Every structure is written in structure tokens, then in C-alpha cells.
Amino acid sequence: MKKDVWVKKTALFKEVYEGGKSIAARDLVLYYLNIGGESQTKVGFSIGKKVGGAVVRNKIKRRLKSIVTNELKNIKKGYALVFIGRPVIATRSFPEVQESLVGLVRGAGIYRNKK
């Protein structure tokens, strides 16, 4: 996975939060913003301290990163996505988190393969 796929700049996070739309599930919230045409989709994660300690938060980020890496080909280009983990995500299994993430992207209308 290329490094330029990940949202790391505070300014882009802020732009997505303020100018984007959001959709929520029990364990994740997705903020998304159309950043234009055929540019590469960018993805970021925000896992707060309420979720758990550093080990737990990093485990969740690794899971989310793995899911996004596998699903990126099915997400429309030209969007900035920010996933925010809610505390209940720490108790979810990998397949449950994957189902939730894909469901949010479908709900936002930016998933290519409609099933």
C-alpha cells in the first residue's frame, strides 16, 4: 500500500471533519469528503484514549488499516475518509469490524460493488 493513501496532515483531518458528511455505526464513525475527480482516495483513522491503552488503540488501527488495504479497490476514487473508533470497537472481532467498515462505506454511497 502506498504511503500517499493515508491521511496524516492535521489540516486534511480538519477539512474532512468540518466540510464533510458523516455516517455512524455502533463501533465506527465515518467522515467523508469528495476531494475531486480521479485523485487517489485518502484514508485516516482516529482512535481516542476512551477506547483503551496504546496497545489496544494500535491493534485497532492495524486492523482498520488491513481492512482498508483489502477494500480500497472497491472504494470510489477522489474521497478523503476518516474513520473514528468508538470504545465498543475494542471488543469486536476482525470480521465484525470489517462488516461495519464496509457497511459504512456502502451507506455513504462510495462503494463500487453494490451487493
Image (spheres, grey):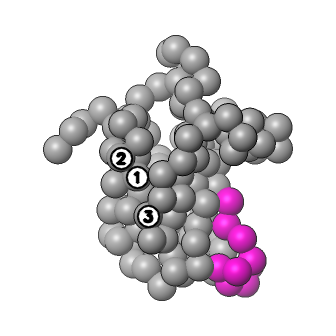
Q: Secondary structure at mark 2?
A: helix
Mark 3 touching mark 2, by CB under 8 A? no
Residue 102, percent from left and from top: 36, 52
Q: CA distance from mark 3 to mark 1?
A: 7 Å
Structural crowding at the residue carrying mark 1, measured as other residues with C-alpha within 10 Å and reported as few (<14), some (14–19) or many (≥20): many
Range of the magenta residues?
46-54
Report which residue position mark 1 lands on: 104
Name the image quarter holding the N terminus.
Answer: top right
- Horizontally, is 37 left or right of 107 in the view? right
**Amino acid type shown at disc 1:** Leu
Q: Secondary structure at mark 1?
A: helix
Q: CA distance from mark 2 to mark 1?
A: 5 Å
Name the image quarter holding the C terminus.
Answer: top left
Report which residue position mark 3 lands on: 25
**Amino acid type shown at disc 2:** Gly
Report which residue position mark 2 lands on: 107
Q: Nearer the viewer, residue 22 or 69?
A: 22
Q: Secondary structure at mark 3?
A: loop
